[in-house]
Image (cartoon, grey):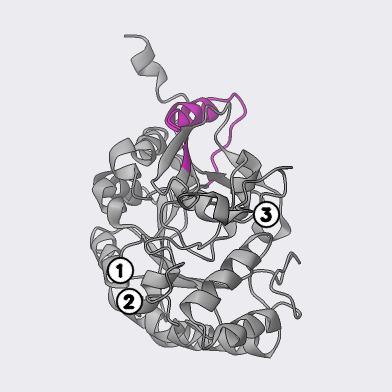
Amino acid sequence: MSHEQNPDYFKGRGAQVNTHNKFLKNKYVLEHIEGLDEPLLENSSTQIFEEHPKKIVSTSNSPDLHFMHSINPYQGCEHGCIYCYARNTHEYYGFSAGLDFERKIIIKRNAPELLEAHFNKKNYQPVMILLSGNTDCYQPMERRLKITRGLLEVFLRYKNPVGIITKNNVILRDIDLLTDLAKLNLVHVNVSITSLDEQLRQKLEPRTITASGRLAVIQKLSEQGIPVRVMAAPIIPGLNSNELPNIIKASADRGALAAGFTIVRLNGSIGEIFSDWVHKAFPDRAEKVLNMIADCHGGQLNDSRFGTRMSGEGRIAESIHQLFRMACVRFLSGRQMPEYDMSHFTPRAGRQTEMF
């Protein structure tokens, strides 16, 4: 039975289940269906929860992401990408990594004010800060909430370097700010493209824009002198691994200066969520896909080993790495992202307006 015929398949959502949160003692279950007049229904609409953090910049000391500084104005993501490693972080908020992750979104309205306070710390030295280290800062609700735009205004006012990862064309709304940042070598944009196959994209990432829409983003940003890297991530053996050269070529044709990729890993609750999904979406090749993923991670679906967890190892992983290297040589030779310029940083840039 295909997922279109499966009555248990949630159309428009990535995850098909709400996995149990390991931090919670209790959970809702349906034990005696014969005692109910109607099915046990969950709220399927997107809900917003507000968080009021004391700080907004996180620093990672992971050997793979050494001293990476990042801001996540949103926790949870409406895009619903089935493979998203950030799903596990939703459990810290008391939610499930499954359906909850894509329909219970935590927002941080005060992020721009907190970023300004961060820049005004006495001993602050400028470093590149990444928007979307965890979830997409340009997910659909950013169109009306404009938290990310507020952050970019602060980055530009203080002239601090910023990196962005997104798969949404909402970023084009802020092309004015990005152009001004790019003139000072203060911004890199990473556009994520997982598949050029629209049928596969709809199953993997049900609430994102099309691959052609993302290629248009690369082209429009590049035309304005904004440096763009394509992120072919994650590569899922048996689903999109054969597309790697085509993704890089199509992006290069539209002005991308560089490319990157990661191999999917299914840590924590994501293993259960992805396995459930792939059996419903691709029942004919589900086991093959899962076996190929495990082959890249020492026989396991999950992989927490620094150095190999994102790049994989083994025969299948090496063939993907070789495919990537060949595509970069062929389509991106002679191109590179410009260096960030830290010299423009203007400490206490907002102080002049405070006098009036």
Q: Observer-nearest residue: 257 or 142? A: 142
In the rendered image, residue 38, in percent from the top left (x then y), is placed at: 45, 50
Q: CA distance from mark 1 to mark 3?
A: 32 Å
Q: Nearer the viewer, mark 3 or mark 2?
A: 2
Rendered view: 342 above or below 56 = below
Seen at 33% across and 36% down, the residue is: 145
Amino acid on which the number 1 mark rests in the picture: Thr
Bounds of the magenta segment: 105-128
The residue under the point 45% across, 48% down is 103
Question: Which amino acid, by three-letter code, is at mark 2?
Answer: Glu
Disc with the residue nearer the chain's start (1 vs 2): 2
Residue 166 occupies quadrant: bottom left
- The quadrant of the image that shows the N terminus is bottom left
Q: Dot 2 surroundings within 10 Å: few (below 14), some, or many (20 or more)?
A: few
Q: Position of residue 263 (x, y in %)?
A: 59, 74
Labels 3 and 2: the sequence-earlier one: 3
Q: Secondary structure at mark 1?
A: loop
Relative to 175, is 334 above or below? below
Are the two marked residues, 1 and 3, in contact with CB atoms closer than 8 angstroms? no
- Answer with mark 1 or mark 3, whichever residue precedes in sequence: 3
3D distance between C-alphas at marks 1 and 2 = 7 Å
Q: Which residue is mark 1?
A: 210
> Would you say the residues marked 1 and 2 are in contact, meaning their CB atoms lie under 8 Å apart?
yes
- Amino acid on which disc 3 is placed: His
Of the 4 image quadrants, the one containing the C terminus is: top left
Q: Which residue is mark 3?
A: 66
The residue labelled by disc 2 is 198
